[in-house]
Image: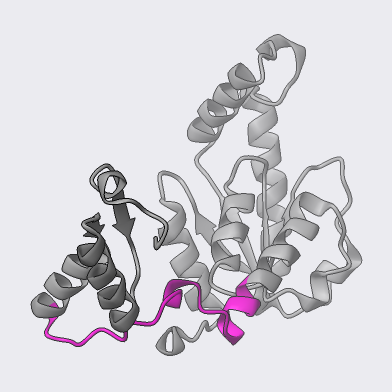
């Protein structure tokens, strides 16, 4: 800034997002001295919000990205969900806070990611009649298992949409076949009843709503969040 000539300063605009008051005022003062245009974006916003809610701001830069214990817990849960997504491995069963079971396209993966953002280690297992279930699933606490079910007609539409998206002809596979879906649902129902786990119908239910039920089921502590 010291090397600027007076004629150059007129063609300069500084857009500032500095939070610290002392630094912000120092920068504004120096710009005024040099005849440089400066706009501080956050200052007016912070002042207005402060008046609206009747609270004084902390003026802490980077507070949104505060890396505390909760932050690292969320990161660990995210890594856990990715590592054990869709039966990549069953090794995490005993360490999972919750295990989601259900047919393909019942929102298992999105739910695991949503829960991970709350610091909950979620693992999901797709139910298919042709694939045997891991023995560990029947040895863990039933309260940590949640079954996801869905209306067959909605599941059919979801799967058809999926096939269109990946440009696969319906006739080539049974994935969206009505009879196949009914058989899968019957199989999933038997598994869930055998486990005696909590069952949630995700038909036309938002991810957030389903996640809330899951969190209540596993005894998530809402008070500390």
Magenta stretch: includes residue 64: yes
Relative height, residue 179 to residue 104 (above, below): above
Residues shaded magenta: 53-74
* Label total for image: 0
Magenta stretch: includes residue 175: no
Left or right of 59 in this view: 75: right
Residue 203 visible? The answer is yes
Left or right of 202 in this view: 29: left
Residue 123 visible? The answer is no
Q: Residue at x 51, y 26 (%)?
A: 157
Residue 164 percent coordinates (x, y): 59, 17
Question: In what quadrant of the picture does the C terminus appear?
Answer: bottom left
Q: Picture quarter containing residue 155?
A: top right
Residue 17 percent coordinates (x, y): 34, 63
Relative height, residue 164 to residue 100 (above, below): above
Residue 179 percent coordinates (x, y): 66, 26
Please tell me which residue lies in front, 203 or 42.
42
Residue 63 percent coordinates (x, y): 43, 77
Question: In what quadrant of the picture does the N terminus appear?
Answer: bottom left
Q: Residue at x 74, y 66 (%)?
A: 80
> By what rule are the colours in the image chosen?
one colour
């Amino acid at each position: 800034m010291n090397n600027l000539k007076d004629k150059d300063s007129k063609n300069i605009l500084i857009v500032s997002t500095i939070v610290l008051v002392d630094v912000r005022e120092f920068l504004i003062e120096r710009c005024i001295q040099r005849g440089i245009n400066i706009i501080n974006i956050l200052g007016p916003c912070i002042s207005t919000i402060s008046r609206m809610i009747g609270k004084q701001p902390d003026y802490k830069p980077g507070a949104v990205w505060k890396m505390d214990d909760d932050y690292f817990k969320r990161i660990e849960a995210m890594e856990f969900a990715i590592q054990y997504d869709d039966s990549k491995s069953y090794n995490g069963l005993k360490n999972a806070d919750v295990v989601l079971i259900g047919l393909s396209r019942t929102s298992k993966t999105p739910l695991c990611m949503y829960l991970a953002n709350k610091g909950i280690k979620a693992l999901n297992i797709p139910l298919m009649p042709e694939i045997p279930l891991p023995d560990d699933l029947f040895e863990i606490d039933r309260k940590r298992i949640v079954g996801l079910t869905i209306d067959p007609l909605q599941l059919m539409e979801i799967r058809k949409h999926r096939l269109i998206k990946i440009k696969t002809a319906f006739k080539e596979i049974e994935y969206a076949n009505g009879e196949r879906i009914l058989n899968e649902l019957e199989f999933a129902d038997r598994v869930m009843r055998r486990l005696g786990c909590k069952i949630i119908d995700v038909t036309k239910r938002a991810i957030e709503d389903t996640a809330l039920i899951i969190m209540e089921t596993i005894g998530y502590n809402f008070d500390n969040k």
